[in-house]
Image: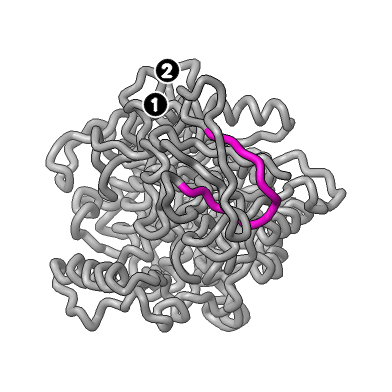
């Protein structure tokens, strides 16, 4: 017989159902903590509360029939990990690569993705960041509508498929980061409210009632989420977690949930001897997010930096709508500020928010900010999911890559970016509930209709064609101009290894010169200069503060002037060393 446990504090009767037969459960201890346990045969199981139908286990390690099906136990000790030693991969100094399993390959599985890990090794990245892999409705989706945060989406390959992927990555020296969602669960297959106070009306989020982190019953909810996080790091040997939208984790307790999670992860890292880490997505521009717990912070290792993205995006594209407006007022100056101060909005007024936003970032810790030109959000949340490569020349793409990969931040790429993929990455879902599917479809059209888009111009999230359009075309890599862009990314990442001065995280040591009228920008990194000319006409003479010594990498054309300056052809980028 197997012992089953579940937290159901408000239930009067709890049974575990296995193979169509229900077995009684009893309250644990004095019955006040809400936990129940009982014995039943091993097999696919569900819990029946107060005579209702069998529901999946909130802590289900596997959902073989999807979010609405019964749960299945997983013997993590039974998986045959390879004998290759793995001591972990620290975040500082690394290059990340964000990957969506379902569209990375036509097969859309962990095993198929693992077949391309050698490409990532050759590219030179250090960490593969998987978008969420918890079960969600249907086969296709971004993963942010997931439920069962202890389980793995079956169409991707289930628990063993994820372990095989992690094992294959580790054998090649690649670490694995997993994107997890603690701020909400998807609208379909979420049975947590039936079990107990997992959500609270005390706070509200864009998804409705908030996850209960500070109301009655929140001790168990916090343990539930922290237990899930530790399970990924322990049972699946994941190296770090990316935490979705941590600003939406409403918590008024004296000890914030993220602080507690950071402490628990630090303890597991000490126990395993691996440098485990947490990366937050936050739009608060608050350095306390990544300050150590001992210094009064929340203890996350790093956070995404949308300010740098927005400054770089406006510089490369000229877009100025919505939240780009403040950056687009002077994109050269915006890039300079982001590269030397971390946050663009560091207490300054945000016209998009209609108020002052952020506070200064500590300059010594640039590695605590992830820098990127493209992410799943910044591509997929556009109406047509168009990448930068859909509108920018290879020269401008090369400039963006150089500014990311030689920045004082921790660089991150989005899959296919390295070869200027011609495929879009669009918003897609596979909701099985027709009413929910139609609501998502119409909501997407209304959102972009408010910005002037016609309904037929916005891809249908539920259409199979939308998913297929988003799958990478791996044959592009060997064709021009894709091959030239791929070679440029490889060279830049190799430069990071060969010249550590290009990776230093001290924002205070970075200087940026620029001339918006002449469309050039120079980033000073010790003895190195990253020189960018974005104009489409004539060569530009770009002054260097010290005599030119050598060119380390070049996209386009450049040549030194007799006075030590550098001439750059149209849309060219050079990484040079000065005397």
Instruction: Indicate whether 301 appears above or below 109.
Output: above
Residue 579: in sight, yes or no?
Answer: no
Label 2 close to label 1 by CB (< 8 Å): yes
Answer whether residue 41 is magenta in the image: yes
Answer whether residue 58 is magenta in the image: no
First along the sequence among labels 2 and 1: 1
Instruction: Identify which residue, 182 or 445, lies in the foreground.
Output: 182
The residues tagged by marks 2 and 1 sit, at their Cα atoms, a distance apart of 7 Å
Instruction: Indicate whether 516 appears above or below 110.
Output: above
The residue sitting at 49% across, 32% down in the picture is 300
Residue 153: in sight, yes or no?
Answer: yes
Circle 2 — which element?
Answer: loop
Residue 478, position as x, y percentages in the image: 62, 80
The residue sitting at 34% across, 73% down in the picture is 461
Task: Name the quadrant of the N terminus.
Answer: top right
The image quarter in which residue 171 lies: bottom right
10 Å crowding of disc 2: few (<14), some (14-19), many (20+): few
Instruction: Identify which residue, 233 or 539, lies in the foreground.
Output: 233
Residue under numbered circle 2: 296
Q: Main secondary structure of the magenta part?
A: strand
10 Å crowding of disc 1: few (<14), some (14-19), many (20+): some
Instruction: Identify which residue, 76 or 547, lies in the foreground.
Output: 76
Q: Which residues are magenta?
A: 36-48
Circle 1 — which element?
Answer: helix
Residue under numbered circle 1: 288
Q: How many marks can you see?
A: 2
Residue 188, position as x, y percentages in the image: 38, 60
Instruction: Indicate whether 262 appears above or below 571.
Output: above
The image quarter in which residue 212 lies: top left
Residue 353, position as x, y percentages in the image: 17, 43
Residue 452, position as x, y percentages in the image: 14, 72
The residue sitting at 58% across, 60% down in the picture is 20
């Amino acid at each position: 017989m197997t012992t089953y446990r579940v937290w159901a504090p408000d239930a009067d009767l709890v049974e575990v159902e296995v193979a169509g037969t229900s077995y009684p459960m009893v309250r644990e201890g004095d019955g006040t903590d809400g936990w129940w346990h009982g014995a039943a045969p091993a097999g696919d199981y569900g819990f029946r509360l107060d005579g209702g139908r069998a529901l999946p286990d909130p802590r289900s390690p596997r959902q073989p029939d999807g979010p609405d099906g019964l749960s299945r136990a997983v013997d993590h000790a039974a998986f045959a990990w390879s004998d290759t030693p793995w001591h972990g991969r620290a975040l500082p100094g690394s290059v990340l690569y964000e990957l969506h399993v379902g569209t990375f390959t036509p097969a859309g599985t962990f095993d198929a993705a693992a077949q391309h890990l050698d490409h990532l090794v050759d590219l030179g990245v250090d960490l593969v960041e998987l978008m969420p892999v918890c079960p969600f409705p249907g086969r296709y989706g971004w993963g942010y509508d997931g439920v069962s945060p202890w389980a793995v989406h079956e169409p991707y390959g289930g628990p063993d498929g994820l372990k095989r992927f992690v094992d294959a990555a580790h054998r090649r020296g690649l670490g694995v980061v997993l994107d997890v969602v603690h701020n909400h669960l998807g609208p379909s297959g979420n049975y947590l409210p039936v079990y107990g106070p997992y959500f609270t009306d005390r706070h509200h989020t864009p998804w409705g009632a908030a996850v209960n982190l500070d109301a009655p019953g929140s001790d168990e909810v916090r343990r539930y989420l922290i237990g899930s996080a530790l399970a990924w790091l322990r049972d699946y040997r994941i190296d770090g977690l990316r935490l979705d939208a941590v600003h939406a984790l409403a918590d008024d307790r004296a000890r914030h949930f993220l602080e507690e999670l950071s402490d628990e992860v630090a303890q597991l890292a000490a126990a395993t001897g691996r440098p485990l880490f947490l990366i937050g997505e936050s739009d608060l521009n608050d350095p306390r997010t990544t300050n150590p717990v001992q210094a009064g912070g929340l203890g996350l290792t790093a956070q995404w930096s949308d300010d740098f993205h927005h400054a770089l995006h406006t510089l490369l594209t000229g877009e100025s709508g919505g939240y780009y407006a403040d950056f687009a007022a002077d994109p050269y100056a915006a890039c300079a500020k982001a590269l030397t101060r971390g946050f663009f909005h560091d207490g300054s007024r945000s016209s998009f928010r209609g108020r002052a936003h952020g506070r200064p970032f500590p300059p010594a810790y640039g590695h605590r900010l992830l820098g990127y030109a493209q992410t799943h959000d910044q591509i997929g949340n556009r109406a047509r999911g168009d990448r930068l490569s859909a509108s920018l020349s290879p020269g401008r793409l090369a400039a963006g890559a150089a500014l990311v990969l030689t920045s004082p931040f921790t660089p991150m790429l989005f899959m296919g970016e390295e070869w200027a993929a011609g495929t879009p990455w669009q918003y897609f879902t596979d909701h099985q509930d027709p009413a929910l599917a139609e609501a998502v479809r119409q909501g997407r059209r209304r959102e972009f209709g408010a910005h002037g888009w016609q309904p037929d111009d916005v891809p249908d999230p539920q259409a199979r064609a939308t998913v297929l359009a988003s799958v990478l075309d791996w044959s592009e890599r060997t064709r021009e101009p894709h091959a030239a862009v791929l070679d440029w990314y490889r060279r830049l990442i190799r430069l990071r290894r060969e010249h550590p001065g290009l990776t230093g995280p001290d924002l205070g040591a970075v200087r940026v010169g620029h001339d918006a009228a002449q469309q050039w920008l120079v980033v000073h990194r010790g003895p190195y200069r990253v020189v960018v000319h974005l104009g489409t006409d004539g060569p530009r003479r770009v002054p260097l503060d010290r005599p030119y010594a050598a060119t380390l990498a070049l996209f386009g054309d450049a040549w030194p002037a007799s006075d030590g300056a550098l001439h750059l052809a149209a849309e060219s980028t050079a990484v040079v060393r000065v005397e």
